[in-house]
Amino acid sequence: MVKIVTALFWFVIGTAATLLFAGVFLFIFGQSNRLVCQHQADRLASCTVSHVLLGRLPLPGWQASCVKEAYVEESCDSDCTYRTALRTSNGASRPVSEVWTDQQAQDLQLADEVNAFINNSQAPTLVVDQPPQAWVIWLVGGLALMTIVILGIVVIAQMARVLLGAGR
């Protein structure tokens, strides 16, 4: 009986650890971003970035005033990764998303949209929604489910050994 309780204990601990890992991973990579910009003065904009986790849970965002341009940051340690950032009139910059990706074309398109908006004072408001990458959500969910199923199979095998007398 002790072996069954021990197996159930490790199943609960393993499941909790798996769900915690999946939750942290989804928190980092499962966010969607909404960028909203409005004109301030001549060729300057005020932009707000808000984040939503898995399309449901709002997270804190931020606001930048006096945005003069958007550009694509590049990091080429081993392979190149990219993200779009906003630069203000005082030279400060802030990335729209903290996540670096290999999607250079997508980041260039976002930077072009923001820059076109800033240069067109007739455009009322710019709203750009960036959904999370669906494959990341499916991958994390699938790996978590697979791990929990494997842990369940191990627990069932342990219980069968004890109940059928093979565990003596």
Image: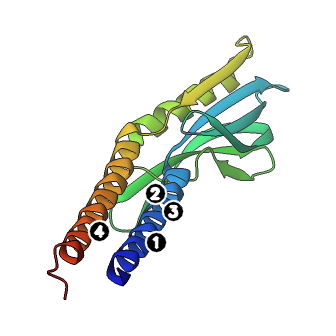
* Nearest to the observer: residue 5 or residue 25: 5
Q: CA distance from mark 2 to mark 1?
A: 14 Å
Query: Vertically, is 121 above or below 87?
Result: above
Q: Which mark is residue 71?
A: none
Q: Which residue is mark 4?
A: 155
Q: Quadrant of residue 39?
A: top right
Residues at discs 2 and 3 in contact (Cβ within 8 Å): yes
Q: CA distance from mark 2 to mark 3?
A: 5 Å
Foreground mark, 4 or 3?
Answer: 4
Q: Which residue is mark 3?
A: 20
Q: Mark 2 belongs to which amino acid?
A: Ala
Seen as rendered, the residue at the extreme right is 41
162 vs 32, left or right, is: left
Q: Which residue is mark 2?
A: 22
* Nearest to the observer: residue 146 or residue 94: 146
Q: CA distance from mark 1 to mark 4?
A: 12 Å
Query: Vertically, is 69 above or below 91?
Result: above
Q: In what element is the residue under mark 2?
A: helix
Q: Which mark is residue 13?
A: 1
Q: CA distance from mark 2 to mark 4?
A: 21 Å
Q: Mark 1 belongs to which amino acid?
A: Ile
Query: Vertically, is 32 above or below 15?
Result: above
Residue 119 spot, x, y in % from top left: 68, 23
So how many labels did they put on this image?
4
Residue 137 spot, x, y in % from top left: 41, 44
